[in-house]
Amino acid sequence: MTRRSHCPQRFRCARSALLLAIALALTAGQAGAQSNTTGAVFGQASPGATITLENPATGLRRDVTAATDGRFHFGALPPGRYTVTSGGATREVKVVVGSGSEVRFATAEAQQLTSIEVQANAALPIDVSSVESTTILTAEQLDRLPIARSTTGIALLAPGTTRGDPAFGGLASFGGSSVAENTYYVNGFNVTDVYRNLDFAEVPFEAIEETQGQAHTVPSSAVRPAAW
């Protein structure tokens, strides 16, 4: 029996995925392969300094030593609020899925300044190194928004997303792509109905700690021209 694909074209211009990151008490032991449900903390400190990261809510604690250039990095962190300590100074930082949070510590002795110059730019920098569009929403933000308490309701908050044809469940369409091209993950596990690709396993709305919606566009460099 031959199964007909919902995506007959060899190359699609858009692929989308909605990732639901649910912070549980056991998420500290997540494998590195599940990086789409974790975040990172990086920054600058004195070379050779010891930096301690701790999550007061879960007890997760890690220590690293700053490199010779003062840089440090904590990877594969479950989302949540952390404290970062170095040389008696403490910073508080929030980790979100699929993103890195920067922390900086003073690397030189204080100096008396005669003047301070402040420059500001209202325009946010545009990341031209990636063709991926990412939208991250926390449980606090979702609680304040007047949306349907469902995965599709959350997905429709992403830029360029519209509701698909009701005949196909009214799912979210990312960037004009077919709703059958969506892939859904919960804590890094694919929960999409692989037979029809028009359904997925949902979790209670109140159990969602953080969501990450990603819309992928295939770059022209990844498409090989047909041979004639």
Image (spheres, grey):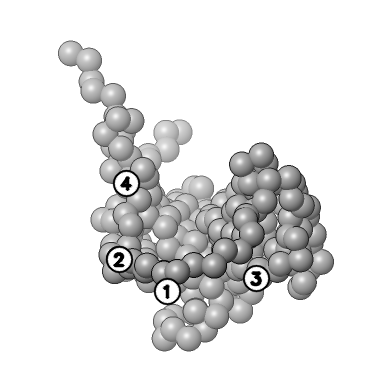
Mark nearest the camera among 2 and 3 is 2
Report if residue 64 is visible in the image. yes
Which residue is rendered at x = 64% and y = 74% of the image? 207
SS type, badge 2: loop
Q: Residues within 10 Å of mark 2 (few under 14, many from 20)?
A: few
Distance from label 1 to label 3 (Cα)? 31 Å
Mark nearest the camera among 2 and 1 is 2
Q: Which mark is residue 180?
A: none
Report the side of 99 relative to 4 (left or right).
right
Identify which residue, 200 or 109, lies in the foreground: 109
Q: Which mark is residue 128?
A: 4
Tell me the quarter of the picture where residue 109 sits.
bottom right
SS type, badge 4: loop
Mark earlier in primary sequence (4, 2): 2
Q: Which mark is residue 153?
A: 1
- The image shows residue 188 at horizontal and vertical percentages of 61, 52
Distance from label 4 to label 2 (Cα)? 18 Å
Mark earlier in primary sequence (2, 1): 2
- The image shows residue 60 at horizontal and vertical percentages of 79, 62
Q: Which residue is mark 3?
A: 92
| Above-or-below relation of 93 to 10 | below
Distance from label 2 to label 1 (Cα)? 34 Å
Identify which residue, 66 or 133, lies in the foreground: 66
Mark earlier in primary sequence (1, 4): 4
SS type, badge 3: strand
Distance from label 2 to label 3 (Cα)? 25 Å
Under mark 3, the amino acid is: Glu
Q: Which residue is mark 2?
A: 121
- The image shows residue 185 at horizontal and vertical percentages of 55, 55
Mark earlier in primary sequence (1, 3): 3
Quadrant of the image containing the N terminus = top left
